[in-house]
Image: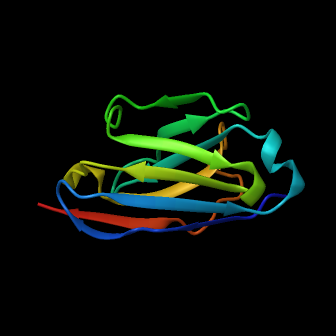
Amino acid sequence: QVQLVESGGGLVQAGGSLRLSCAASGSIFRFLHMAWYRQAPGKQRELVATITSGGSTNYADSVKGRFTISRDGAKNTVYLQMNSLKPEDTAVYYCNRHGALSGDYWGQGTQVTVSS
């Protein structure tokens, strides 16, 4: 089973930037399509961005043009560069394989708070 450790969150003013990292264990990582998700208080977890094993990316409309997902196979790490942050981006951010279900293993996530 792949273990996931997210980091890089914090408190930032609107318009600022953060770069999240997700370190994954396991040799199968490079074969997995990965994704970043987020969950705001009182809301369901939502898909933010995806990246295939080959590096193709896709984004939720709400973050398109502001967020960039990438991966480094040598480091077994997935990144999320977040620019022009808005208060509505405030959430706990998680990475996981694309298509992960709520009952699957999830890491602890990393809190992102954007102040207005």
53 or 102, which lies in front?
53
Specify the quadrant of the image occupied by residue 105. bottom right
Q: Residue furthest left?
A: 116
Left or right, residue 113 beside residue 32: left
Left or right, residue 77 beside residue 66: right
Left or right, residue 10 beside residue 50: left
Residue 32, can we see it?
yes
Asked if residue 102 is positioned above or below residue 3 in the image, the reply reads above
Question: How many numbered marks are there?
Answer: 0
Q: Residue furthest right?
A: 27
Q: Quadrant of the C terminus?
A: bottom left
Q: Position of residue 19 (x, y in %)?
A: 43, 59
Left or right, residue 8 beside residue 29: left
Residue 41, can we see it?
no
Q: Residue at x 46, y 68 (%)?
A: 8
Specify the quadrant of the image occupied by residue 6. bottom right
61 or 77, which lies in front?
77
14 or 89, which lies in front?
14
Q: Residue at x 82, y 39 (%)?
A: 31
